[in-house]
Image: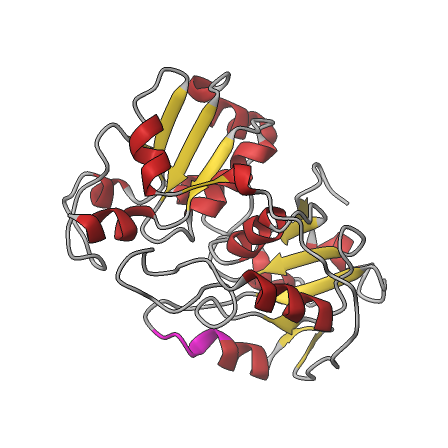
Amino acid sequence: MSRDQFVVSCEWLSKHLEDPDVVIVDCRFSLPDPQLGRKQYQTSHIDGAYYLDLNEDLSSPVREHGGRHPLPNLTELANKLSRMGVNFQKTLVVAYDDSRLAFASRLWWLLRYLGHDRVAVLDGGFTAWDQADYSLTDKIPPIKQAKFDPQIQSNIKVDINGVKNRKNLSGVTLVDSRDRDRYEGIREPIDKIAGHIDGAVNYPWKEVTDENGYVISQIELRRRWLDLEGKEEILVYCGSGVTACVNLLSLELAQIHTGKLYAGSWSDWISYM
């Protein structure tokens, strides 16, 4: 595959398009224009790729609490994965987007939450694939039949009570994944209240990739997380539980396996204020 189990190159994927044990998922999405990703997929996508929408497939409807992107109905998601040909713990799922892994990482985390570790993101995303002149198509792949029976890994997720009870414990660090100006409360383009959870440290998710969407080197990743090595728990949040998954991916790539997602994130936290 590549330098680690969770990232694959365009070159690797191009050689495995016909592999029955590989399923490709297009996760392109735009927060300002929620229909854009699906339109892009319908126009042009990697050959054989299925599409999963952040709002419709990778989240559930917004409620009073739970944040702007609550976790999806897991049974429905498992059924969708089955119809895409994903066999539990057998099929390698390769997710891509064109947003520096923001949405592909959401699927990466969700699959691991469902107990399916055979999942990777495409380094450089759709743009890298397109620029390398690999094959594209507008053909929608057929529905398949596979067996995906999830085994929920509840230990990699926390809710608001978990954050409140544990964020100040020794051995626990709370990480805010948003841009620094949002963390500092200088700018808040989405949520009603600006600022961050008391005690959180800031590791912006965009630092995980370079400006072209390629994951930074193993050495850089280890250096980035050096201060948190040895922590018993690293509780990670963002605005709504999406881009935090990029940081969780990078923790795994840095061989730090104590990261947990605060799924509701800042938008859930402020809903109780």
For residue 203, say whether it is visible.
Answer: no
Q: Nearer the viewer, residue 217 or 241?
A: 241
Q: Is residue 230 above or below residue 21?
A: above
For residue 257, say whether it is visible.
Answer: yes
Question: What is the x, y in percent for residue 12?
Answer: 77, 53
Q: Is residue 243 magenta?
A: no
Q: Residue at the location (75% across, 81% down)?
A: 142
| Colour theme | secondary structure
Q: Is residue 30 left or right of residue 133?
A: left
Q: Name which quarter of the figure residue 1 lies in.
A: top right
Q: Is residue 111 above or below residue 232?
A: below
Q: Is residue 36 above or below residue 130?
A: below
Dominant SS type (magenta)? loop
Q: Is residue 34 magenta?
A: yes
Q: Nearer the viewer, residue 19 or 135?
A: 19
Q: Which residues are magenta?
A: 33-37
Q: Residue at the location (79% across, 73% down)?
A: 145
Q: Residue at the location (65% across, 72% down)?
A: 50
Q: Is residue 198 left or right of residue 79?
A: left
Q: Is residue 94 left or right of residue 233?
A: right
Question: What is the x, y in percent for residue 28?
Answer: 51, 67
Q: Nearer the viewer, residue 146 or 226?
A: 146
Question: What is the x, y in percent for residue 239?
Answer: 31, 51
Question: What is the x, y in percent for residue 101?
Answer: 51, 53
Query: Total label count?
Result: 0
